[in-house]
Image (cartoon, grey):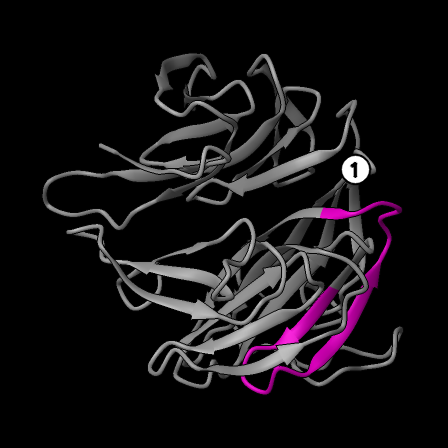
Amino acid sequence: MCRDLLVSGTSSPSARGISLRLWHPVTWACVRELAGHCGAVLSLAVCGDYLWSGSRDCAIKVWDAGTWECVATLEAHADAVHALAVVAGGGGGARKKAANTLVVSGALDALIKVWDGATFECLRTLSGHVSGVKALVAVGRGAAPLELTPRPRGTAKAAAGGGAAVGGGVIVSGAFDRLVKVWSIGSWECVATLKGHKSGITALTACSTEVWVASASNDNTIRVWERHGWACVVVIEAHTDTVWALADYEGQLLSGSSDCTIKVWNKETWKCDATLMGHVQAVHAILPLPTTGEGGSFISASWDHSIAVWQ
């Protein structure tokens, strides 16, 4: 959601070059279309009053959510940009110029890049995966101001103390090399590599209390990792095909798959509470909507070119 509008990316630009569509969350009418990318839009993130989009055309575009004009095109990756995540520090939070905020991108070139959310400058490139990066999630966002100025590796971290993550924050990445990696925010060192999946990682999510992170894979399973120690606490034989989407939702874990279903998992027992059917092709994205007095809802997007709203 951006400026109270739902944003969706197109699987391929139309004849008019449309890359993004904006939808009213009550009437669900399309209220605006944005043109710019020359390939499918694969990732979206909101940073302050800016919308970031990553595409198969290898570019990241930054859109001003006030005017919906493209204000920057970042061409730092050599392959499709599949993941975007936002890291916000304290002392002011996300503002118009996204001060004290970082955006992290992951691409099929196996690289992760860290960007200044206000100036759009690339501050750091993280290498460690040997195959394309498919998913990113920020956990434990900084409680203190973030250090945005690039530093040579090995130099002292002044504000956060010895290179420790700001507020204990980390970026978690998942790639087609079957690995989940944990990166300390601030020092940007890889502090853990999580193994167990038998195929590439396709999705990540963190629970609202940030005590665990869940990963999904082409091996049809979901693994849940506890944050303190990063041990795998449960393996869920989730679906009969690739799990493409994960989301934390009102005390439950949601998963979407190539088997065309969405499953609802009880986070106490890790048993399936419900199986939702409606899409006729793979479910590729799930997004919880802001809670209202009428209760929660979420949306799902599918390769069948539809977006479904669930309550």
Q: Residue furthest left?
A: 293
Q: Residue furthest front?
A: 15
Q: Nearer the viewer, residue 199 or 64?
A: 64
Q: In which image quadrant can residue 94 be found?
A: bottom left
Q: Is residue 262 left or right of residue 142?
A: left
Residue numbers of the magenta segment:
113-133
Does the magenta portion include 127? yes
Q: Measured from the top left, where is residue 236 in percent x and y?
A: 58, 16
Q: Measured from the top left, where is residue 201 in percent x and y?
A: 70, 35
Does the magenta portion include 123? yes
Q: Secondary structure at mark 1?
A: loop
Q: Measured from the top left, where is residue 174 in percent x and y?
A: 71, 43
Q: Residue at x 69, y 38 (%)?
A: 229
In this rendering, the answer to whether 302 lies above or below 107 is above
| Location of the C terminus (image quadrant) | top left
Q: Is residue 220 left or right of residue 286?
A: right
Q: Measured from the top left, where is residue 260 in percent x and y?
A: 48, 21
Q: How many marks?
A: 1
In this rendering, the answer to whether 208 lies above or below 123 is above
Q: Residues within 10 Å of mark 1 (few under 14, many from 20)?
A: many
Q: In which image quadrant can residue 287 be found?
A: top left
Q: Amino acid at mark 1?
A: Leu
Q: Residue at x 39, y 78 (%)?
A: 68
Q: Residue at x 84, y 48 (%)?
A: 129
